[in-house]
Image (cartoon, rainbow, N blue to C red):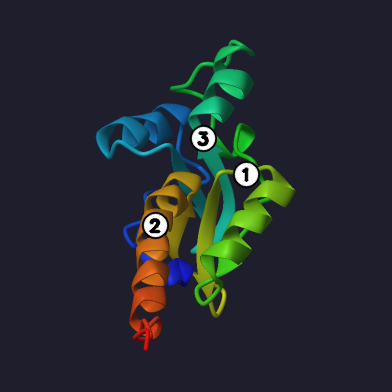
Amino acid sequence: MRVSDVMSKDVISVEASATVFEAVSKIIQFKVGCVVVTKARKIAGIVTKGDVLERALLQRLDPRETAVEKVMSAKVVTIGKYATLEEASRLMTEKKVSKLPIIEKGELVGIITSSDIIRAEPMEIGYLQELVRARFVPHELA
């Protein structure tokens, strides 16, 4: 199964110049765990709930005055649209991230989270079980 099969296509994003308050407002409004930060239509970073807590609130920064680019994770790990779920899982584990923006030809086309992969795995197991059943033809005993 490919990441494009389970990714969310409606990626919530904010411009790097937006405030932390605007980013948090989108996180709450759209009930997501992060927003992708863009600059000139390219991925500049990602902001998670944890980033806001650690880099803004604990540092006592004013969310209405602080630009989101000051608290975002700038080293964004991405994956291609045609990667497999297994490749995405390995990359997430290796890089210790739980959200992967998905790119195609340098453009943001979706996002996949560890929760998306976990939800998709039972489907994958079901497909494998069906394949095994279809290929297994019991032989009649003579």
- Identify the residue position indicated by label 2 in the image: 120
- Look at the picture and state if 70 lies above or below 140: above
The earlier-in-sequence mark between 2 and 1 is: 1
**Which residue: 53% across, 69% down?**
103
Q: Amino acid type of disc 3? A: Thr
| Labels 2 and 1 touching (C-beta < 8 A) | no
**Which residue: 37% across, 84% down?**
141
The residues tagged by marks 2 and 3 sit, at their Cα atoms, a distance apart of 22 Å
Q: Amino acid type of disc 1? A: Val
- Identify the residue position indicated by label 1 in the image: 97
Viewer-proximal residue, 1 or 100?
Answer: 1
Give the position of the C terminus as an image quadrant.
Answer: bottom left
Q: What element carries label 2?
A: helix
| Labels 2 and 3 touching (C-beta < 8 A) | no
Q: Amino acid type of disc 2? A: Ala
Residue 85 shows in the view? yes
Residue that sits furthest to the right in the current view: 94
Residue that sits furthest to the left in the current view: 29
What is the x, y in percent for residue 137?
Answer: 36, 84
Callout in the foreground (1, 3): 1
The residues tagged by marks 1 and 3 sit, at their Cα atoms, a distance apart of 11 Å
- Identify the residue position indicated by label 3 in the image: 48
The residues tagged by marks 2 and 1 sit, at their Cα atoms, a distance apart of 18 Å
**Which residue: 55% across, 26% down?**
50
Viewer-proximal residue, 29 or 8?
Answer: 8
- Please tell me how crowded label 1 is: few (under 14), some (14-19), or many (20+) other residues with Cα within 10 Å: some
What is the x, y in percent for residue 92?
Answer: 63, 51
